[in-house]
């Protein structure tokens, strides 16, 4: 299986901050990388697919980049509703494994 | 509206069997792949396996192969996840999700764009 490692595991930030979350794959996955947001008590919600393409309805303050083994999710200006847990997922090879998650908390 | 509706919460004892369901509507169910994802309490997401209801082709993660069975009834747009003998370690939230395929010049990108709300399974003596 391809291992996905996110960093940091948790992050404290303030409204208006710029935040970057990193995801690293254990092997080259080209740009077969998705990002999801999960709020407490809710199902995950797709934000970004193919490393940098926005899912419909996702605010433009969210952006994704990267290729190969290293990827980032950036939130340009944190809003109160962005405090949640974020997961990356590779879709290069089944099983389509997820990172362990990054919990974004209010400072 | 495109949606996946999952069956309700379950409380079972170790050794019991269980089958939970996920019903799709608002899209072509028989030509979509539907995945199951586990989330243990306070933990991350684990991709368990996927099924194509059109012909019931199924693929499992090695971690879940032999531990669960994924099936489908395309006549009622429903997929299932079942256990023959539950363990306490099966206590988790289980999500179904549609896998969307995006074809770019012959390269297929997969992502889960529609999720059910989840089914909580609690296994306790």
Image (cartoon, coloured by chain):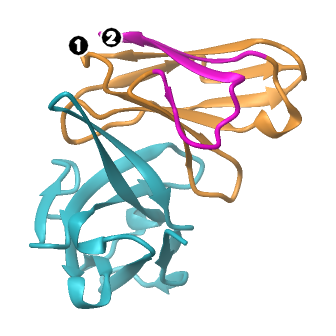
Chain colours: A orange, B cyan
Q: Quick check: B94 above or below A83?
A: below
Closer to us: A25 or B75: B75
Q: Residue at x 31, y 26 (%)?
A: A32
What residue is disc 1 on?
A28
Examine the image and state in which quarter residue B15 appears: bottom left
Residue B71: % across, % down: 20, 76
Few, some or many C-alpha atoms within 10 Å of disc 2 (few <14, some 14-19, many ≥20)? some
- State whether residue A75 appears in this view: yes
Asked if residue B5 is among those painted magenta in the image, a careful observer would answer no
Residue B6: % across, % down: 48, 77
> Which chain letter matches label 1?
A
Examine the image and state in which quarter residue B76 appears: bottom left
Q: In the image, which disc is placed on residue B40?
A: none
Determine whether, in the image, residue B119 is placed left or right of residue A79. Answer: left
- State whether residue B123 appears in this view: no
Few, some or many C-alpha atoms within 10 Å of disc 1 (few <14, some 14-19, many ≥20)? some
What residue is disc 2 on?
A69
Same subunit, labels 2 and 1: the answer reads yes
Examine the image and state in which quarter residue B13 appears: bottom left
Q: How many marks?
A: 2
Q: Residue at x 26, y 16 (%)?
A: A30
Part of the protein shown in magenta: A52-76
Closer to us: A75 or A87: A75
Q: Residue at x 90, y 23 (%)?
A: A15
Is the C-beta separation of discs 2 and 1 under 8 Å? Answer: yes
Asked if residue A68 is among those painted magenta in the image, a careful observer would answer yes
Q: Quick check: A17 above or below B64?
A: above
Closer to us: B118 or B17: B118
Q: Which part of the image, by quadrant, shows the N terminus of chain A?
A: top left
Secondary structure of the residue carrying tag 2 is loop
């Amino acid at each position: 299986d391809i291992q996905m490692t996110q960093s940091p595991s948790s992050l404290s930030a303030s409204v208006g901050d710029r935040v970057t979350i990193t995801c690293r794959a254990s092997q080259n996955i080209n740009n077969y990388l998705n990002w999801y947001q999960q709020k407490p008590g809710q199902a995950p919600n797709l934000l970004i697919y193919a490393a940098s393409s926005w899912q419909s309805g996702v605010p433009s303050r969210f952006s994704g980049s990267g290729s190969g083994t290293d990827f980032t999710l950036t939130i340009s200006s944190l809003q109160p509703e962005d405090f949640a847990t974020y997961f990356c997922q590779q879709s290069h090879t089944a099983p389509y494994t997820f990172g362990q998650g990054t919990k974004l908390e209010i400072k | 509206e495109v949606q996946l509706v999952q069956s309700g919460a379950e409380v079972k004892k170790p050794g019991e069997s269980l089958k939970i369901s996920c019903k799709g509507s608002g899209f072509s169910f028989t030509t979509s792949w539907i995945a199951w994802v586990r989330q243990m309490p306070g933990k991350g997401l684990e991709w368990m396996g996927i099924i194509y209801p059109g012909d019931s082709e199924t693929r499992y993660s090695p971690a879940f192969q032999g531990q669960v069975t994924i099936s489908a009834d395309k006549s009622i747009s429903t997929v299932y996840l079942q256990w023959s003998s539950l363990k306490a370690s099966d206590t988790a939230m289980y999500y179904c999700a549609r896998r969307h395929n995006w074809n770019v010049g012959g390269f297929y990108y997969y992502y889960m764009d529609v999720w059910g709300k989840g089914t909580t399974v609690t296994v306790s003596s």
